[in-house]
Image (cartoon, rainbow, N blue to C red):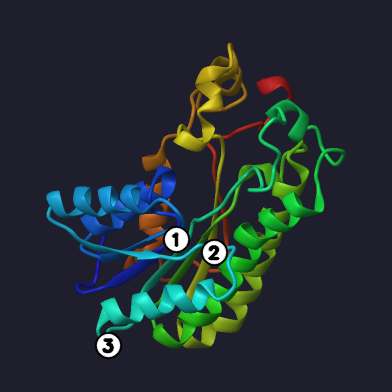
Amino acid sequence: MTQPQGRTALVTGASAGIGRDIARRLAADGVTVAVHYGRRKEAAQETVAAIEEAGGHAFTVGADLTADGAVDTLFAELEEALEGRGLDILVNNAGVSLGRDTPSDMAQDDYVAGISHVTTEVFDSLFAINARAPFFVIQRALPLMGEGGRIINISSAVTRIAWPLLAYAMSKGALEIMGSRLAQQLGPRGITVNTVAPGITDTEMNSWVHETPGAEEGISAMTALGRLGLPDDISAVVAFLASEEARWVTGQLIDASGGLCLAPGGM
């Protein structure tokens, strides 16, 4: 893919999982990547070390996106590190499926059952990270972005599947609604906005898949391509959207789930 040299990117939630792989893939394409972390500084440093070992360029920026003033903190660090350069790519990847205020003794089966066990604290935590933070991160990033800028939001396939995780799906739905409207608003500036919706991906966040008997086999059976998603399945899509080849793609929601739940019973 054609990649202009000297580009910069901010990837939120890049200390682990899909975000880490997105950061590594963009860096491999010659992009200098700001690796954002919320609470896992050492993990973010490991991401940067892996990028640099592979010959890429990256640095960490830290901010707990649920805290007051977090976006100011994030962009103060980012702008200092950029040393006057602009921001070419923004990937809003940071997200949670269980609110930080979910009681530690609540079984996941209880939590995902739907509306009954969701407290106001859990609901607000989910929306703070999954919807509010991307909105205001984009708001702050726009003055740094010029023509050819790329904004890529990471949603979830659960917005189109009537599974539980109701509040989580609602928060990701809000993110998807934002995408098309921003694409229309930012089109005259030559900035594209797209959304990627992964399915169940083999990451630390989804460790339950390997801990629950039969889960991996069941999910694979419900997926057209017959397996769990991998982080590099998602980062490949993001890398395309960030590339020059994707200059005419904007306002789109791209399902990157391997065809999860395309038919009843996985048939």
* Crowd around label 3: few <14 · some 14–19 · many ≥20 (10 Å): few
* Pair 1/2: label in front: 2
The answer to whether the residue labelled 2 contacts the one labelled 3, judged by CB atoms less than 8 Å apart, is no
The answer to whether the residue labelled 3 contacts the one labelled 1, judged by CB atoms less than 8 Å apart, is no
SS at mark 2?
loop
Q: Earlier in the sequence, mark 1 or mark 2?
A: 1
Taking depth in this image into account, of 131 and 156 the one nearest to the observer is 131
Is residue 53 visible in the rendered image? The answer is yes
Give the image location of residue 212, x and y in percent. Answer: 58, 17
Q: How many marks?
A: 3
| Residue position for label 1 | 12
The answer to whether the residue labelled 1 contacts the one labelled 2, judged by CB atoms less than 8 Å apart, is yes
| Residue position for label 2 | 65
Determine which quarter of the picture holds residue 243: bottom left
Q: Which mark is residue 243?
A: none
Q: Is residue 103 left or right of residue 155?
A: right
Q: Residue at x 43, y 68 (%)?
A: 90
Q: Which mark is residue 84?
A: 3
In the displayed structure, 111 sits above or below 6; it is above
State how far apart marks 3 and 1 are (Cα): 20 Å
State how far apart marks 1 and 2 are (Cα): 9 Å
